[in-house]
Amino acid sequence: MAMNRNRIGVLLLCLFAASTMALHAADRPQLCELLPVADVSAVTGGTYKTTEQQADYANIAHCGYLGAGGPDSVSITFAKGDTASQRWEQGNMFNPKAIEGFLDQAAWEPMRGTLTARSGDKFAEIRISKSDNHGDEATRIAKAKKLVEMLFEKL
């Protein structure tokens, strides 16, 4: 009898954990749905064959866009709340160039081709690969800024 109660307790605990994880998953921004391949292609001029999404925690999400015929790729990470502040600090470890006048804070890290941007409790990191299709640094920054604007408008 005691063994059955233990099994029931474990089962209830598992059901509670699964329902809690499902609730947190529902709160996560689904980046690949918010910025579908067609939208990213329209901004960057690239052709992407696939996306992959990995959501690490309730307040952070990632979507990668892989080029259809070469090295083109775009990577987008989004965070909100306290996680946004943490990601901003992590994203600025590489001494990026500040971008004045764009959102609350923004910076470009040329070695990684990454724009980090913050507005209120929202954070985005956009990495656009260095390829002929994506243009020079100024063009890549402009494309990354457009993707951030599109993302933040939808959130």
Image (cartoon, grey):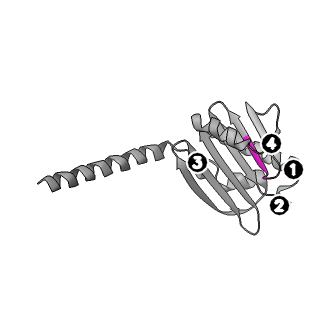
Q: Nearer the viewer, mark 3 or mark 4?
A: 4
Q: Residue at x 72, y 48 (%)?
A: 126
Asked which secondary structure carries label 4, the reply is loop
Q: CA distance from mark 1 to mark 2?
A: 10 Å
For the residues carrying marks 1 and 4, which lies nearer the camera in this image? 4
Q: Is residue 128 above or below residue 98?
A: below
Q: In the figure, residue 142 lies in which quadrant?
A: top right
Q: Is residue 9 left or right of residue 106?
A: left
Query: Quick one: quadrant of the N terminus?
Result: bottom left
Please name the residue shown 65% across and 41% down the image.
87
Disc 1 crowd rating (10 Å Cα; few below 14, some 14-19, many 20+) is some
Numbered badge on residue 96: 4
Mark 2: few/some/many CA within 10 Å (<14, 14-19, 20+): some
Residue carrying label 3: 61
Tell me if label 3 and label 1 are in contact, CB under 8 Å: no
Looking at the rendered structure, the kind of residue marked 1 is Glu
Distance in Å between CA atoms under marks 3 and 4: 22 Å
CA–CA distance between discs 3 and 2?
25 Å
Q: Which residues are magenta?
A: 111-116
Q: Quadrant of the C terminus?
A: top right
| Label 4 Cα crowd, 10 Å radius (few <14 / some 14-19 / many 20+) | some
* Disc 1 secondary structure class: helix
Tag 2–tag 4 contact (CB < 8 Å): no
Image position, residue 28 (x, y; %): 52, 44
- The tag on residue 137 is 1
- From the image, tell me which residue sits under label 2: 131
Q: Give how far apart the Cα atoms at labels 3 and 1 are.
A: 26 Å
Place of residue 119 in the rendered image (x, y in percent of width and height, measured from the top left): 68, 32
